[in-house]
Image: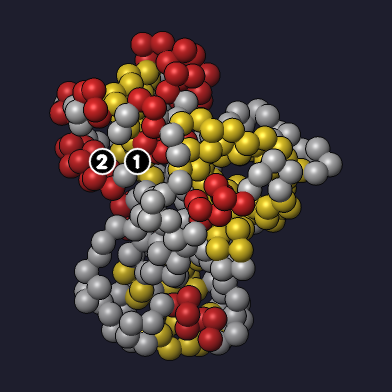
Amino acid sequence: MSCSSKETHTVVVELDLVVHRRRVVAEGVVELTLRRQDGAALPSWEAGAHIDLVLGPDLVRQYSLCGDPADRCSWRIAVLREHGSRGGSAAVHGELAEGSQVGVRGPRNHFRFEPSRRYVLIAGGIGITPIMAMAAAADDRGADWSLTYGGRTRASMAYASDLRDRYGARVDLRPQDEFGLLDLDSLLGEPAGDTLVYCCGPEPLLEAVEKRCAGWPRGALHVERFSPKEFDAQASDHPFEVVLARSGRTVMVSSGQSILSAVREAGVQVLSSCEEGTCGTCETTVLAGEVDHRDSLLSEEERAAGETMMVCVSRAACAKLTLDL
């Protein structure tokens, strides 16, 4: 995932919620509506936010909220059953029935929906989940917006009919078996002023959108990834020192070791989840030093600012980092 806005010093809320409702919303996609057992209000959230589902001792997965932020009594997510599941989607589909309890952390937002006069929204497959809330927010703001939504087949595209019924011609449904790949050259071929582009979907779609937006104004494109970007692992894989300012300790991070691992070995606990630089759970404030960013979340501007880093994957581009840990 990457985004235009960052969170620092996030207060992580941990909740035990109940699956209030479960329904199939497309082929291989199940929607869960989560509530507190006592019906009390849930924390507020904005378009682009996600939550962690704690599905087991070492099984935590992130899912975008796709319901109505004004509904404080329930959170809604939709989960695609992945054929190559590492356990997350299989657990959701196989174990979470109506009435099941599940641990939840969040919400967090690394895909924040920024103000603009015009939006181009692009979704591929289950990437529609964060984009749905953005379409509603854009409409509420009275912005000029459009949504282009692609999927393998019409039956595999969650909420396709609902979106078309609600927003009409603003939503362009493009099942691949009917129309082929999305026509990104028409959508993004000419940079447009006062326009933000938001895209979520599989990696080939994100790479294609990034390529088309290379000539757009800096900061116009916002994408969210499900899988980590690839980086040159040999670029700066040297040992370095990390000073933990709050705990008053200094640890050495060896070649091939993550900061997260080194810090944990030193007895300092850092909340983490994906450990591949896509969820933002381990985002840590940088107090001094230069960072070799290897996450899939931070924007170019945020990387240049060097104020935070994902300690699960990013490293030092210098001999010593000082972190707010």
Q: Position of residue 118 (x, y in %)?
A: 36, 22
Q: Amino acid at mark 1?
A: Gly
Q: In the figure, 92 relative to 295: above or below?
A: above
Q: Local crowd at mark 1 within 10 Å, few (<14), some, or many (≥20)? A: many
Label 2 with label 1: CB-CB less than 8 Å: yes
Q: CA distance from mark 2 to mark 1?
A: 6 Å
The location of residue 158, given as percent across then percent down, is 45, 30
- 4 left or right of 221 in image: right
Q: Is residue 255 above or below residue 325?
A: below
Point out residue 247 in the picture as x, y percentages from the top left corner.
61, 81
Mark 1 lies on a secondary structure that is loop
Q: Is residue 177 visible?
A: yes
Q: In front: 78, or 281?
A: 78
176 versus 254 height, above or below: above
Give amino acid for label 2. Answer: Leu
Could you say which disc has been placed on residue 201 in the image?
1
Residue 187 visible? The answer is no
Q: Residue furthest front?
A: 94
Picture coordinates of residue 292, whole percent (x, y): 31, 69
Q: Residues within 10 Å of mark 2 (few under 14, many from 20)?
A: some
Can you identify the residue that label 2 sits on? 205
Q: Quadrant of the C terminus?
A: bottom right
Name the element at disc 2.
helix
